Amino acid sequence: MVDATIHHKNVAHHLEVGLSTGMSHCLLDSTYVVDSLGVDISQLKPSTINGEKRGCCVLQLDSLEFCGETYRKVWCLVMETKRRLKGNMPRVVIGNNVLGGKAWRVDLKGQTFTPCSPKLHYSKTRLKWKTGSTYESTMMFLKAKVGGRKVRLQFTMDLGKNILPHGIYPFPSTALTKEGGSLQRGISEETIPVYEGVTTEIGDFRFTTDYVLGYPGDEMGTLRATAFEGHPFVVNYKKKLIEILE
């Protein structure tokens, strides 16, 4: 979580925000927009989120103060995130329309998130990502080997568990019953396979981490920043690199 200040109309609201490299735009919870910013969401224009209709609309903030910089006229998606996910998501999530085009140093242990120069290199351990088309144009896709099997993973700084594409894997697993879900599915109790301590390779970077199995139809997995075993790292949007620091 990072401190930020939102300015809209005559309201200036300071709060902690979440970060997501998997969201094309910033995301606001609809209850927060109504109660804290005084917005009538019935007057907002309907929109889509990552190319799908999910009951959301759009709002342009006057400005956003974030990590020492002021971003003006910031477009945000508005939807009922707190209700759908039972409070398991921040009221405001900063997406790639703010994060993109820059480089950011991330230290999860030290709980710091700071801008740095996108022109420089910071480590010899570099994970190259590719982007998709249309609404996927700001997403980070990594080619990986998980337990020796080739998979495609989307990198994100969202909290949660790493996810393997749906399929059959020759790894030992245990069953976990928990509340889980997504913006599309909402939150419900589910029992899923968990694969612990799986060796993962991305380029020359090798590490072990845990995964859960994705839902049927999920052809791509998800890799969280917490998988990097506590290493700080730099996300460089200009160079399309994640550089793992020592």
Image (spheres, rainbow, N blue to C red):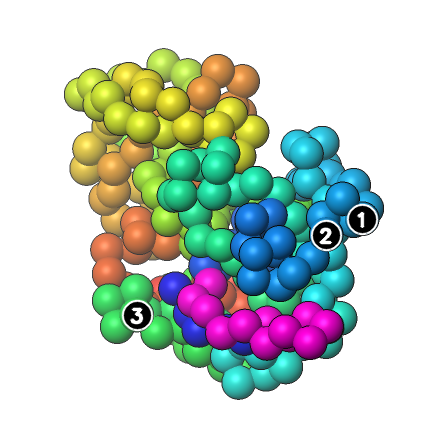
Question: Residue 223 in magenta?
Answer: no
Sequence-first tag of 3 and 2: 2
The kind of secondary structure element at disc 3 is: loop
Q: Which residue is mark 2?
A: 40
Q: Secondary structure at mark 2?
A: loop
Q: Which residue is mark 3?
A: 111
Secondary structure state at the residue bearing disc 1? helix
Q: CA distance from mark 3 to mark 2?
A: 35 Å
- Check residue 43 in the rendering and tell me which mark sits there, or answer none: 1
Disc 3 or disc 2, which is closer to the eye?
Answer: 2
* Chief secondary structure of the magenta portion: strand
**Mark 3 and 1 residues: CB-CB less than 8 Å, in contact?**
no
**Vertical arrangement, residue 48 with respect to residue 102, above or below:** above
With respect to residue 19, does 22 lie above or below? above
Seen at 39% across and 64% down, the residue is 1
Tell me what residue is drawn at x 65 percent, y 48 percent: 78
**In the image, which residues are magenta?**
6-17
In front of the other: label 3 or label 1? 1
Q: Amino acid at mark 2?
A: Asp
Q: Quadrant of residue 100?
A: bottom right
- The numbered mark, 3 or 1, whose residue comes first in the sequence reads 1
Tell me residue 133's x, y (percent): 74, 43
Tell me whether circle 2 and circle 1 mark residues in contact (CB < 8 Å): yes
